[in-house]
Structure formats: structure tokens, C-alpha cells
Amino acid sequence: MGLVSEYRFILPRGLVDEAGQVHRQGVMRLATAMDELVVERDRQAQQLPSYGALVLLSRVITQLGALTSLSPDTLGNLFTQDLAYLREFYNRINQKNEAQIPTRCPACDTAFAVDLTLAGE
């Protein structure tokens, strides 16, 4: 069995493109050292460190719905819930840590955590 280097995910809300189409299903690959170096060299990430997460995610997300090329500016249109999900997903697949996603019951508004399950596990 070979190394699994790509993982499927489904965003909680989805990225809405300019045409109004929602993109929820995607693929993220494992990060490389070069991915992290690119973030360090990016001028906008140097000026605004939180922008670095968008730069990094734009490199490792290989597909999101019908989109196969994502820029940091495109990912800037993500809902915050989806950005938090992608950050946690990135950490989980690259560091192999257990992760839980905080959520709320829509019926009773009770807060609880759900284990993040990866496709392919």
C-alpha cells in the first residue's frame, strides 16, 4: 500500500463563486516544504500574517467543486466556518493529530464537538 497524499473533504457551507455556484467537495494534498517557503516569501503574507493561511491553502487544495485552480483571493471569499474547517483539515492530514470540530445542534442549540473524519481513512 502506497502513501496516501490526497484527501477528500466536504465544506460545511461551500465556496460561492461569481456565478452563484456553490463548491463544497474538494481534494487537498499533503503539504511540502516548498509550500511553506512560498508562504514565507509572499509579500501580502509578510504584511498580514493571517493571509498566509490563504496562500498555503491555495497551494494544497487541488480541487474544490468544479474549480481546479484557486487563488488566495478566491479563498478569501470562504465563509469563516469553511476556513476554520480547512485549517483544521490541513493540520490533521499533515500532522496526523486527532481533531474535533466544534458545532451546535440546530434544534436545541447545544454545543458539542464532532470528530473530523477524513475520506480514505
Image (tube, rainbow, N blue to C red):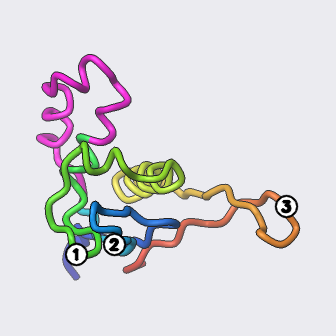
Check if residue 33 falls in the magenta segment.
yes
Single out the residue that lies furthest toward the right. 108
Residues rendered magenta in the picture: 30-54
Residue underneath mark 3? 110
Which is more foreground, mark 2 or mark 1?
2
Q: Nearer the viewer, residue 62 or 77?
A: 77
What percent of the width, then of the height, locates residue 75? 31, 50
Kindly identify the amino acid type of the residue bearing the numbered disc 2. Answer: Gln
Callout 3 environment at 10 Å: few (<14), some (14 to 19), or many (20+)? Answer: few
Q: Earlier in the sequence, mark 2 or mark 1?
A: 2
Q: Is 28 drawn above or below residue 43 in the view shown?
A: below
| Amino acid type at mark 1 | Ala
Mark on residue 39? none
Mark 3 or mark 2: which is in front?
2
**Location of residue 61 (image quadrant):** bottom left
Viewer-proximal residue among 96 and 76: 76
Q: Give the alpha-carbon distance from disc 3 to disc 1, as whole Å.
A: 35 Å
Residue highlighted by disc 2: 21
Viewer-side residue, 9 vs 74: 74
Q: CA distance from mark 2 to mark 1?
A: 9 Å
Query: What's the distance in space between the residues labelled 3 and 2, CA to CA?
Result: 31 Å
Residue type highlighted by circle 3:
Thr
Asked which secondary structure carries label 1, the reply is loop
Q: Is residue 40 above or below residue 114?
A: above
- Which residue in the structure is indicated by mark 1? 66
Is disc 2 placed on a helix, strand or loop? loop
- How busy is the neighbourhood of tag 1: few (under 14 within 10 Å), some, or many (20 plus)? few
Q: Residues within 10 Å of mark 2 (few under 14, many from 20)?
A: few
The spot of residue 3 in percent (x, y) is 22, 71
Quadrant of the rendered image containing residue 120: bottom left
